[in-house]
Each structure stands twice: as structure tokens, then as C-alpha cells.
Image: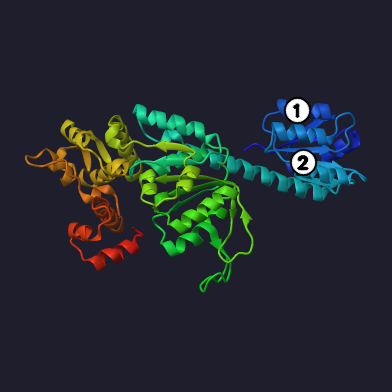
Amino acid sequence: MRPPTLLVIEDEERMRRLLELVLKPEGYELILAKTGEEGIRALSEVQGLDLIVTDLQLGKTSGLQVLEVAKRALPDVPVLIITGYGTVKSAVEAIKKGAYDYISKPVDNEELKIVIARALQVRQLSRDNQALRAGLSDQFGFDRIVSRSPQMAEVKRLAGEVARSEAMVLITGESGTGKELLARAIHYASPRAAGPLVALNCAGIPEPLLESELFGYERGAFTDAKKSKLGRFQLADRGTLFLDEIGELSPTAQSKLLRVLEDRTVEPLGGVRGIKVDIRVMCATNQDLPDLIKKGRFREDLYYRLNVYPLHIPPLRERREDITALLDAFLQAASREQGSRIRGMSPDAFATLERYHWPGNVRELHNVVEWLTISCKEGEVRREHLPAYLRTLDEPGQKDRPSLLSFGLSVEELEKTMLQEALDKTGGNVSEACRLLRITRNTLRYRMAKYHLT
């Protein structure tokens, strides 16, 4: 491991020699510059600088000028200012402009060593953070969205363009198409990649808790509020907030969300003042929001606020070129992570998968691969290794009928979907909906209240 490289800019020969005598034994590689101009040239010529130590008074080119150039050229490299008597005010000004710290003359050798060691720790943390961001970008970047179809190529192109902006994004598509994966790729390709990505599934939080999850609360706001809690908006400050299943928000939550989006101010429950947040908001839904607006279940003004840059992910059945690419990727991942020894698929097994209409989309295909790693221990996947509902597709008298389990939905989600479908089909007629569902009116009304259906 190479020693840290320090650029020392000092116009006084005696002071320059003193710094060299103090710092050389610490194992640092020193680059010495006699003037500010020489130091500025070194910023572009020397590779791998870890710290800049510069006197404030350098004659023609001042230490402040060196600082300004350094922060533009090497923003992650700390700059330590050495200042004489009477220039402490200027040193404080340098701190405001981005200097790491300052030391007054006469320099205390031990203090200098401690401050430099701390500055180098900051430099290392910055490097580690850059490496982490690069790793996250690789892990969640657009290249990780496996596809070969022209439809997905266009989606990724548009997503790459909007990633560079601050615009709100609304991602639509059926369940299991990869909406959250696309949102993560946009975040890690954006200028906010260094900030947090906070996600919330609006359908997964009970209505009484949703407001406190979004906006937080102060201690004593309600009976069980023993201490304050930050909401998702505050947790996402300087980053991105991703709201999945936005169509599930109640009218009250929609109203409060609209207010936050308009003034970027959050009011925690029990709070007495608003808190400013710097966030980008992305949303996703598998519902038809314009249809919900017609039914009075979604605010039109909120829809237009969210729908600044719409992105639609087509279902897997409309981009069958991606099935092969996804199968290959999932099988390779299974081999790498689980030690699967599957080498490929037989023509009849692949033909069955290609004909299937995939109502659960990419999530369902991934589940099938998980199944295959259990049913086929090694070698080639044959048709008999496929799940039963897929094997029966080509049998006489069988239709392309999916298993309910293939949708990747919970029991509550399936129940809610059935209730909503019955209400839609009957135009909201409760008696007719009860007949279709074969349940009593009281049962239907109870479940409608449970799922906030109208």
C-alpha cells in the first residue's frame, strides 16, 4: 500500500524545511512547492494527491486562490491552511470556502501531525464512499435490467435521460414488471446517487400508520409516542423518496402528500413547525390512475403533480425477446449463488415457457427458475421439471390458465383485487357484487372498509 501523498505549498524556505523535517519521518510522500503558482501546477501534474497543506500568505498567488483551484480540480482532497498572526479571520473565511482546517503559526508539531492524520482519515472515508457509490451504481444500474427487446431499450433510454434531471417520475406497469428496479437505476444514475434512496410500499402500511410513516411524529403526539420518529420524507433528505403503489393512498394521505410536494415542507404529527426537505420523488403504480380519478378515488391535481415524466414498463408477454435473456440471467445467478448445476433447457421446455403469457411478469419467471433449481438438480431442464400449471398448458382441453400463486400476490392482495373487480363489474351495486362473490352484504361491507374500497 502506497504512503499518503501530501502537497506542501510554502514560500518561506525555513518553514518549508521545518515541515519537511516534521512530516517525512511520519512516512508521508511530500511534494514541495515554493509558490502558489507552482502549487497550482502540481494539482494537475501530480497523480494521487491525498492532502494539500498551504500557507495563506504566498505572495503573488494566495493560499485562498490555491484553495479555490483545488476545490474545483480535486474536490475530495482536503486542504489544510497554515496562517500567521493577524490572518486568522482570513483562515476562517477559507474554512467557509471548503478548507478542512487551519493551523496558526508558530506551528505546534504534534498538533500538525494530529490534524493531518484526521484529514487523511476524512480522505479515506471519501474514497470508501466513492467506491460504495460506484458499487451501488453497478449493482442497480441500467445494465442490471436484463432485456433484449426494443421496448425495454426505449424505456431505459428515457430513464437514463430523466435520471440527470430533478423531475418527478411516475412509473406504471403491471405487478412484477420491475418498477422498483427501474426506480433504483434512475436514482443511482442521478446527481443524488450519494444521498439515500428511501422506499415505501403504500399498500403495505395500514392506513392509521401511513401518515406517521410518511411524515414522522414528535414525542407525545399520541399515546404510544414515547420518542420522536423521523418520517420517510426526512429520511430521504438530499436523496430520493420512492413511493410504490401510489394508487393505494387514502384521500387524506393524498391531500397531505400534495401539500408536501408543493412546498417541500413536512409537518410531523404533533409538531408545531414545518421542516424543509430536499428530495426527489418517484412513484409507481400498477393501477390506471386516470380511471381512479374518474371514480373519485384519486386526486386529479395530485396526478398531474406526479405525472411530470411518465415511464411505462410493458408486460413480459409483449416483449417475448426478453424471456430468453431473463432465463439466462436467472440461471446464471442460481449457479453463482446457489451452486445450481443446470446447464440449459430442452427445446420443448423452452417452447412451453415462451408460449406462456406470464401474468406475473418477470417476478413469476424468477419464481419458476427458483422452482427449477429444486426440481432439476443438474443437467438440462426438461418439460417434466416445470411447475404443474405450466406442464398442463399443452394437454388436450387445457387453456393457458395460470395458477393464482404465479401472480406473486398475497392473500390480502388477491382478496382486494377480487372485491374491486366485482364492484367494477357491477357498477358499484353491492347486492350484485355479493352474488358474484357469494358472500353476505355485511361481509362485503366489512371487507370494503378494510381495504378502503368505495
Image quarter in which the N terminus is found: top right
The spot of residue 46 in percent (x, y) is 71, 28
* Above/below status of 73 relative to 439: above
**Front disc: 2 or 1:** 2
Residue designated by label 1:
42
The spot of residue 108 in percent (x, y) is 85, 49
Disc tally is: 2
Report whether 438 appears left or right of 265. left
In front: 110, or 454? 454
Outermost residue to the right:
86
Which image quarter: residue 98?
Answer: top right
* Above/below status of 420 relative to 307: below
Element under label 2? loop
Which image quarter: residue 17?
Answer: top right
Report whether 155 appears left or right of 29. left
The spot of residue 323 in percent (x, y) is 28, 34
Q: Amino acid at mark 1?
A: Ala
In front: 311, or 82? 311
Element under label 1? helix
Q: Residue at x 85, y 38 (%)?
A: 55
Residue 447 visible within the image: yes
The scheme the figure's colours follow is rainbow
Residue designated by label 2:
97
* Above/below status of 314 relative to 212: above
Residue 22 visible within the image: no
The reply to whether dot 2 and dot 1 touch (C-beta < 8 Å) is no
Q: Residue at x 86, y 40 (%)?
A: 18
Q: Residue at x 93, y 45 (%)?
A: 86
* Above/below status of 217 relative to 24: below
Q: Amino acid at mark 2?
A: Lys
Q: Residue at x 63, y 43 (%)?
A: 126
